[in-house]
Image (cartoon, rainbow, N blue to C red):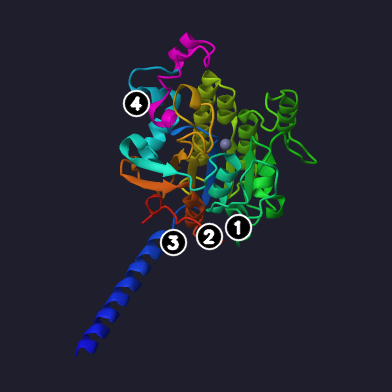
């Protein structure tokens, strides 16, 4: 009798387990309307500026701001909600209404990186592969031994040669690895083609004649223009656009330029979304995912830098905007997500299953269609 009871319980439990498992799978891998994903990154842009606008402890410092009066006029208001809209008008008028924004730690909603280094290459490796890798612990130009989500997607039926990456930082050639066989335009790359359009030739000329203050990073404007052109001409199904200025200006201690650059990037994102929503190929079939590779320190001195010695450098944020994502706006749930979850989230949006690494983070279910 007792044995009979146990057998029944066991059966019931496994049945429950099987049905729960089934439900979760349907939930994550169910049919998404999304056919295209554009992944956008803002290097080292802090959650503090995203959710609170210009930092009251930094904006008035003559050491960090060339023209305090002018910068205050552009980015200051006593209300943090007004401030953040001055800095990111598209994000707070459109993504906050139609999409999802995760990472406001003031509300207990957190996004972190899982890697223990808190700088760029380990951050992008985590974002693009779904896992941290102890071999990736510097920004050195080492070909990534791991397969990124970009490489994985490019190998799938219907996605071959439909994956591209545009980046301001030239190390993306190594992060993605040329083995991936995808179109990469990074650093000072120009458009190379037998027959350049007039616009492409002019853009190449402008970039080559506008030397960047940084060795390995070009101005984001060029990354953006090249990416937008490529989007219009080639209709990729998965595209990475990695902007880099915010991190570079922060390292230089130029808070005004960091803010201006953040503001410009908001405009770039608006332009991309406007194009997407007015183009037949993309309209209502495209999801934008926007994030950063790491956080930075807090306060007067630490904001400039990041890394294991600067607490808060593991604090990031994520935004999602597209046909499958419920309009949750600024998410207020007390919970934590990780950048390592985005590789599988991208795959799930494209109705693919990214199983490259057993340690990859699970897809973010609240971003996907139910
Ligand atoms: Zn970085």
Going from N to C along the chain, the mark reached first, 1 or 2, is: 1
Residue nearest the viewer, comparing 262 with 136 = 136
Crowding at dot 2, Cα within 10 Å, few <14 / some 14-19 / many 20+, comes out as: many
Q: CA distance from mark 4 to mark 2?
A: 37 Å
Residue 69 higher or lower than 98, as above or below: above
Residue situated furthest left in the rendering: 1
Q: Residue 348 shows which numbered tag?
A: none
The quadrant of the picture showing ligand 1 is top right
Q: Disc 1 marks which residue?
A: 152
Residue 142 percent location from the top left of the image: 70, 47
Residues at marks 1 and 2 touching, judged by CB atoms closer than 8 Å: yes
- In the rendered image, which residue does mark 2 sit on? 354
Q: Secondary structure at mark 2?
A: loop
> Which mark lies nearer to you, 3 or 2?
2
Q: Is mark 2 within 8 Å of ligand 1?
A: no
| Disc on the earlier residue, 4 or 1 | 4
The residue at the far front in this view is 309
User: For residue 66: magenta?
Assistant: yes
Mark 3 in CB contact with mark 2 (< 8 angstroms): no
Q: Secondary structure at mark 3?
A: helix
Q: Is disc 4 placed on a helix, strand or loop?
A: helix
The disc, 3 or 4, on the residue closer to the chain's N-terminal end is 3
Q: Which residues are magenta?
A: 48-74
Circle 4 residue = 81
């Amino acid at each position: 009798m007792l044995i009979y009871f146990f057998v029944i319980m066991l059966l019931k439990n496994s049945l429950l387990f099987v049905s729960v498992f089934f439900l979760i799978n349907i939930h994550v891998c169910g049919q998404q309307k999304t056919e295209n994903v554009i992944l956008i990154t803002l290097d080292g842009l802090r959650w503090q500026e995203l959710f609170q606008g210009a930092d009251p402890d930094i904006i008035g410092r003559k050491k960090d701001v060339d023209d305090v009066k002018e910068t205050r006029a552009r980015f200051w208001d006593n209300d943090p909600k007004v401030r953040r809209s001055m800095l990111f008008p598209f994000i707070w008028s459109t993504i906050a209404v139609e999409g999802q924004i995760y990472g406001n730690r003031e509300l207990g909603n957190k996004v972190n990186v899982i890697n223990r280094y808190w700088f760029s290459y380990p951050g992008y490796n985590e974002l693009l592969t779904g896992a941290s890798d102890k071999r990736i612990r510097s920004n050195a130009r080492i070909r990534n031994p791991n397969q990124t989500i970009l490489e994985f997607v490019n190998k799938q039926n219907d996605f071959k040669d439909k994956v591209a990456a545009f980046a301001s930082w030239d190390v993306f050639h190594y992060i993605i690895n040329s083995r991936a066989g995808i179109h990469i335009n990074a650093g000072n790359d120009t458009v190379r083609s037998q027959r350049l359009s007039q616009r492409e030739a002019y853009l190449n000329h402008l970039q080559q004649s506008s030397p960047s203050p940084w060795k390995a990073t070009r101005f984001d404007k060029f990354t953006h223009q090249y990416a937008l052109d490529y989007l219009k001409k080639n209709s990729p199904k998965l595209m990475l656009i990695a902007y880099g200025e915010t991190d570079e200006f922060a390292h230089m201690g130029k808070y005004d330029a960091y803010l201006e650059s953040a503001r410009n990037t908001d405009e770039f994102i608006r332009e991309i979304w406007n194009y997407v929503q007015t183009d037949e190929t993309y309209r209502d079939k495209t999801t934008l995912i926007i994030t950063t590779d790491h956080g930075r320190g807090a306060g007067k001195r630490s904001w400039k830098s990041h890394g294991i010695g600067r607490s808060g450098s593991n604090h990031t944020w994520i935004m999602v905007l597209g046909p499958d994502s419920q309009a949750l706006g600024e998410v207020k749930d007390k919970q934590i997500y990780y950048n390592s979850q985005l590789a599988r989230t991208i795959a799930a949006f494209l109705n693919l299953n990214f199983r490259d690494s057993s340690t990859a983070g699970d897809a973010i279910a609240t971003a996907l269609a139910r």
